[in-house]
Amino acid sequence: MKQQFDAVLTGSDTPVNGIVTEINNGIYEFNSLDESLQLTISRDANGHWTRITGSEPYLSGWVDELAEQIQLATNI
């Protein structure tokens, strides 16, 4: 079973609640509960978290927010 956990990203008006799923080794996908936001991130060759794909509009701070929550949830 793929690992899943709840996450919240800071939206422009209100927080965006969703579920994070590890879809592949080190690739994580955030899907908002209201289906308004999708964001997929992973680490690059230098170990920095980067956006692979996702919905628009997109706030650049979401990668850092999501990466922090992934690290807390998975202890990596």
Image (tube, rainbow, N blue to C red):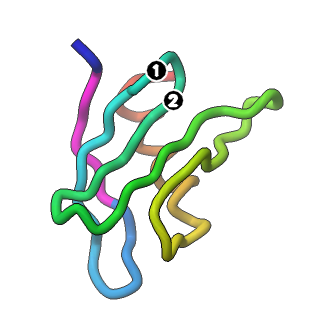
Q: Is mark 1 in CB contact (under 8 Å) with mark 2?
A: yes
Dominant secondary structure of the residues highlighted in magenta in the image: strand
Q: Residue 12: where, in percent of width, then height?
A: 40, 84
In front here: 10 or 20?
20
The residue that label 1 is drawn on is: 24
Q: Say what amino acid the circle numbered 1 marks.
A: Asn
Q: Which residues are magenta?
A: 3-8
Percent of width and height locating residue 8: 30, 58
The amino acid beneath tag 2 is Ile
Measured along the vertical axis of the image, is residue 13 above or below residue 72? below
Mark number for residue 69? none
Q: Residue furthest top?
A: 1
Q: Which mark is residue 27?
A: 2
- For image coordinates 24% across by 53% down, the residue present is 18
Position of 11 compared to 25: left or right? left
The residue positioned farthest toward the bottom in the image shown: 13
Residue 5 falls inside the magenta stretch: yes
Left/right placement of residue 39 relative to residue 6 reads right
Image quarter (top left, top right, bottom left or bottom right) of the N terminus: top left
Number of numbered labels in the structure image: 2
Residue 9, how many percent across, how many down?
A: 37, 62
Residue 70 position by quadrant: top left
Residue at horizontal 51 percent and vertical 61 percent from the top:
62
Calculate the distance from the C-alpha at mark 1 to the C-alpha at mark 2.
Answer: 5 Å
Residue at image point 36% right, 47% down: 30
